[in-house]
Image (tube, rainbow, N blue to C red):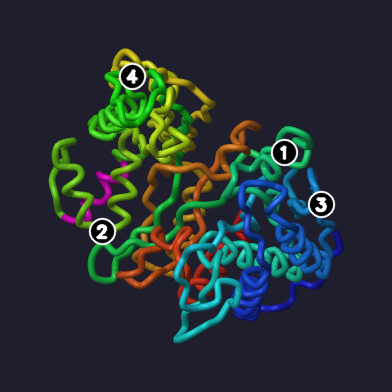
Amino acid sequence: MTTTSGAATDGAHEGRIEGESLEFARGLIRIDSVNTGVTETTGNGEARAARFVAERLAEVGYEPEWFKPVPGRASIVARLRGTDPAAGALVVHAHLDVVPVDGQAWTHPPFGAETHDGILYGRGAVDMKGFAGTMLAVARALAREGRAPRRDLVFAFFADEEAGGRYGSRWIVAERPEVFAGATEALGEVGGFSLPLREGRRAYLVATGEKGSVSIDLVARGRAGHGSRPTPDNAVVALARAVTAVADHPFPIVRTPALDRFIGVLAREFGAGPVGDEALDGFLERLGPPGRLISAAARTTVSPTVLEGGVKRNVIPAEARAQLDIRTVPGHERTIAAELRAIVGNGIEVVERGSIPAIESPMEGELIELLQAAITGEDADGIIVPFQMPANTDNKALALLGIRGHGFTPLRLPNDFDAFGQFHAADEHVPVESLRFGGRVLWRVLRGS
């Protein structure tokens, strides 16, 4: 690619990054790229968002590559060549799709990208068009500067993350893996959000692992009949008992390396002694909403999400089914089905629908040191703290190629701001100053790569 002179000062670059981060985030939010999970009803919003990205990358000399597995669904990937071919490339990624807004009580237009009192509102403000805009701004700044980084940087803007990446990251990994040739590490969601520790001291979370996910159905069968004549083997009753048994089952805490590091750092910051399993949930409660996220990541969780059974009020059905959303600690995805069979007992069929294994990445090394240095450059007392994500991101698809993913989309936030609570919520929003901070940090990270 062709680059321009690097004579501009760091301050000028950072100022332009701050302005473009907000401009591009707002531009992307205004594009309705809702992913319904069904291609026929999703529309072409992702393709329009991809065009927005591609045009702005091309303006500064990139040659963005398009990936269109089906009409309306598109991803964009562009590479900035580094000076050291032997250094593993770094993938920086965001997704361009968002979840639906139907049935939610928004007080600001979800695709209006309005700003009020220093706050940007709109679907994707946090998840994750805000970071996509920041990525785009920093990629352009690197091209304008004209100074190549040490390692290749691969900027990926994916479709379909909100529905598992079938037409986004997973499609590219399966069909065009050469796009990520030489890549060894990745930065994407979810992490980088600040967490208050004590006066003037913040932790910035970095996801160094993601729990596995397993899809399982519970199926109860019985004798069909008229609703006026109760049967002893009513499938709905049997299913209800099974679902209750699963919901009441206490899955134990599993002390992964990421959890132990997280608890150790916070215990030192709070002046607390060792935190045992029995005291862990209480200890995490003092962190507020982020603490509940860490608590969920510390054990396998099972959430019944869909119940199916019966077609008419006065007909006892022969079958009833429950869909379970299961998030497993590393390794548990191989044994959870057998454990559920023991919990629900005889008479309930446990049907496995698929699984994605957990991933774990290093908590130490050059990249972590670089993230810490970038945070310190903008927040002198800020510290990087690893944690395990309880959900899936595009890092799981990249892991199939051996790329070690980290969740880091930096935002310095007000102490009472619940970043994780913004995901998929009505009136999703983010402070404008937090976006500016994120742009400065990402600039430091990628310029130092």
Q: CA distance from mark 2 to mark 4?
A: 31 Å
How far is mark 2 from mark 3, CA to CA?
41 Å
Up/down of 380 relative to 157, above or below: below
Q: Quickly name the residue at label 1.
A: 171
What's under tag 1, amino acid-wise?
Trp
Give the residue pinned by disc 2: 288
Kindly identify the amino acid type of the residue bearing the numbered disc 2: Gly
The residue that appears at 23% across and 65% down in the rendered structure is: 198
Q: Which mark is residue 66?
A: 3
Q: Residue 90, can we see it?
A: no
Q: Earlier in the sequence, mark 2 or mark 3?
A: 3
Q: For the point 28% across and 52% down, which residue is it?
A: 291
Q: Amino acid at mark 4?
A: Glu
Please, what secondary structure does the residue beneath circle 4 have?
helix
Rendering coords of residue 145 (x, y %): 73, 69
Q: Residue at x 54, y 63 (%)?
A: 101
Q: CA distance from mark 1 to mark 3?
A: 12 Å
How far across and down, in percent of the image, does residue 263 sit?
26, 45
The image's mark for residue 314 is: none
Mark closest to the chain's N terminus, 4 or 1: 1
Find the distance from the CA under tag 2 to the CA under tag 1.
37 Å
Tell me the tag on residue 339.
4
**Which element is circle 2 on?**
loop
x, y percent for residue 361: 49, 37
Instruction: Tell me the magenta residue range.
Output: 261-270
